[in-house]
Image (tube, rainbow, N blue to C red):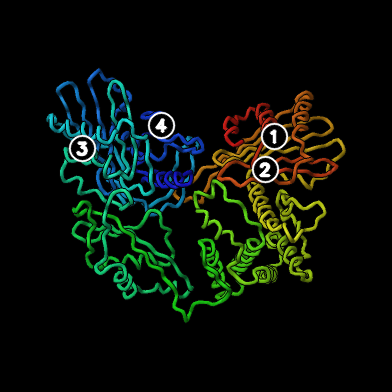
Amino acid sequence: MKIKYLHIVTALLCLLAALPLSAQQHRARWNFEDYFPKNYFYDDKEFSDENDAVGEVVFYMRLADIKPLRDITLNKGETILRLNYIPKFAHPLFIQVQQKGDQILLTWQKGTALRGYVQHITHLAMSDTGYVDVTENYYHSNEWEKGVLDSGSRQLTLTEWQQIQKILTDIDFIHFPHCRPCSGFQTPYILEFKDNRNSISYYTECPDGKKEDRVTKLLVSLVDTDYVDMVIHFANDRNNIIVPTFPGGEEACAAFLQKSIQYPPDALRDMEEFNARVKLIVEKDGSLLPTFDIYSSKSDYGFEDELMRVVKTMPKWNPATKDGKKIRCYVYVNYKFVLPEDIRPKYGNPILETQRDKSRWKSIESFHRKTLQNPFDLEATLWLAKHYYWEFVFEHEAPEPLSAWDSSHYQEDDWANYHDRTSVVAQPGDSALKYFYKALELNPDATTMTQIYMPILQLEQYLHRAHNLLAELPFDTVDGVHFPHSYLINWPEDGQLDSTKDYYMYMNAWHSFWWVKYLSEELTRMHEPIIFNDTLQEDEAIFRFSFFPSFHPPVSFRIMKNKRNVTLYWKILSRKINSKNEGDFTYVLKEGHRKMTTAQYEQFLQYFEEVHLDERPHSYYVNMFDGAQWMIERKTNQGFKGHFTNVAGKNIHRVYSFLATLSGVKLDYMGKYL
């Protein structure tokens, strides 16, 4: 369930983050804990963003100045029932029923904000306060802003109150779980109930028609009998909705699309194919309201626009029904743009049985087209070689057991198919070596060599080929970077590759190139010198400790020892994003230095000794979603040693903390990245 929740959280983060800047200026930062206890709706300890899934509703509660129910004290016999209801393309609705003795008061208000949908987000970044900020977006809706469109109150009759109580008793609302999430976010809402003994809050986006949907519909009907008709439903296996249909059924719909679709000319020229999808709202009279889907990736060739054009010409559909009544409902229309057979490139040996096969084959096809159009396209040639190499690795790699993480994506049978160890192309090793050689011919420099040196050696050894002369280019050309390109590769001790197992040494080499480039760029911005090729005397030494966190400024500590003294230098690089151009940054460098006493230097050496730098590999990197990078360097007249990692233990952390204390640099956030 972890991945499912992660998708839910990602969707809401995107929706919240995409609010227009003008709307953001009208609101204060909301805090989940102002309304509900931490971890109230989710108790999964591995799920780090438990509360974000209900954030949209809490955000509206803050905008509407709704007082948290937990701050209200009730006497014996008093009760409060609340509903915060936020359908798409409808105004948010807050309803409260408060009972005091014989008095039952219904109050309600509609927010001014019309909830819409996100079409495209270009950049998201985590700010220092922990909130997600957006620098550029397109948001199709009225602005989210504070205000009340309409409100009112009235006394409920005893019969109406008894209806509410009966439903709450029938569905046993007091014992509901706190949350029942599902993907889609069509109508997120929170139901709350409180008396002098119990307090329960329940969140969902896909209500059960036989349970919570009953009380929701009753409360809404007490306010506005027409409001329910504004809600747009999404058919699922719990709500008994009969989905809308094209006149004549799916085959008639497919024939209509096939007859009307015109292949985008640019896509024909570039031989591009695409699975396009649009989401429709089918009204109760069968008319259509087309809209883009928040989750679909949009192509650059106008495939979705063409599908949208055709959809707008469709006749009225047969509307959805529920319990015999016509309702508004979402439906997806998909169309696969496939090139005519006479211009489709033909090569390889596709075995398209699994989702992995289809994805890999599509990538290989895409880069083949580019190399056919331009034989001198180095980037396409490199990526094609890499895809063939990954197929070579896949074919020879031993299957892995199904893990708990994998089980959230695959059923047991699917996993067996995924690990059938069959490449989607014939002779992937030969093909990979062919395109690696071609890449060297196109650009025989150190950068290209860094990316492909390891797989060339491996493939030549496996295929019993003669060593290619181009592979003799200097591999460790410095080119002004802070480390040799190959430094972060953990080479085998004997310097030889075992063709039966070292398949991922290639990825290690590529990562080395990437991280050397990244670290060098950051250290250059901090005006840090290159130290690995310095010439030092016997009593001289240089130590550098660089820390690159994801959401905080990078920091570098450098210790310079010579005959007379030891000096500690520190630098902090702050980065500010230009709101008008997401790729434009302003850098601010703060720096300082101080002399270290003999006692301080000896204490540092003691801590440093416990790091055991000489016993560590050049690189130790663990794949993870996020974190920080740590680079430790030591240069003496005996040589250079460095260690790069994204997993810092307590000994490394202690050195950084010690240097931060000496320099006065505040690194309170460093513990978050351990």
Type of amino acid at the residue the image marks with label 2: Thr
Q: Nearer the viewer, mark 3 or mark 1?
A: 3
Type of amino acid at the residue the image marks with label 1: Ile
Estimate how packed mark 4 is, as few (under 14), some (14 to 19) or many (20 or more) residues with alpha carbons within 10 Å.
some
Type of amino acid at the residue the image marks with label 3: Leu
- Residue on which the image places disc 2: 645
- The image quarter containing residue 224 is top left
- Residue on which the image places disc 3: 219
Q: Which mark is residue 40?
A: 4
The percent coordinates of residue 285 (x first, y second) are 18, 59
Q: Residues at badges 2 and 1 in contact (C-beta under 8 Å)?
A: yes
Return the disc, 3 or 1, that comes first in the chain's sequence: 3
Return the disc, 3 or 2, that comes first in the chain's sequence: 3
Return the disc, 1 or 4, that comes first in the chain's sequence: 4
Q: Which mark is residue 465?
A: none
Estimate how packed mark 1 is, as few (under 14), some (14 to 19) or many (20 or more) residues with alpha carbons within 10 Å.
many
- Residue on which the image places disc 1: 652
Return the disc, 2 or 1, that comes first in the chain's sequence: 2
Q: With 429 as the anchor, is 498 left or right in this view?
A: right
The percent coordinates of residue 4 (x first, y second) are 45, 46
Estimate how packed mark 2 is, as few (under 14), some (14 to 19) or many (20 or more) residues with alpha carbons within 10 Å.
some
Q: CA distance from mark 2 to mark 1?
A: 10 Å
Task: Count the numbered circles shown.
Answer: 4
Q: Residue at x 39, y 64 (%)?
A: 276
Q: With 594 as the anchor, is 162 left or right in this view?
A: left
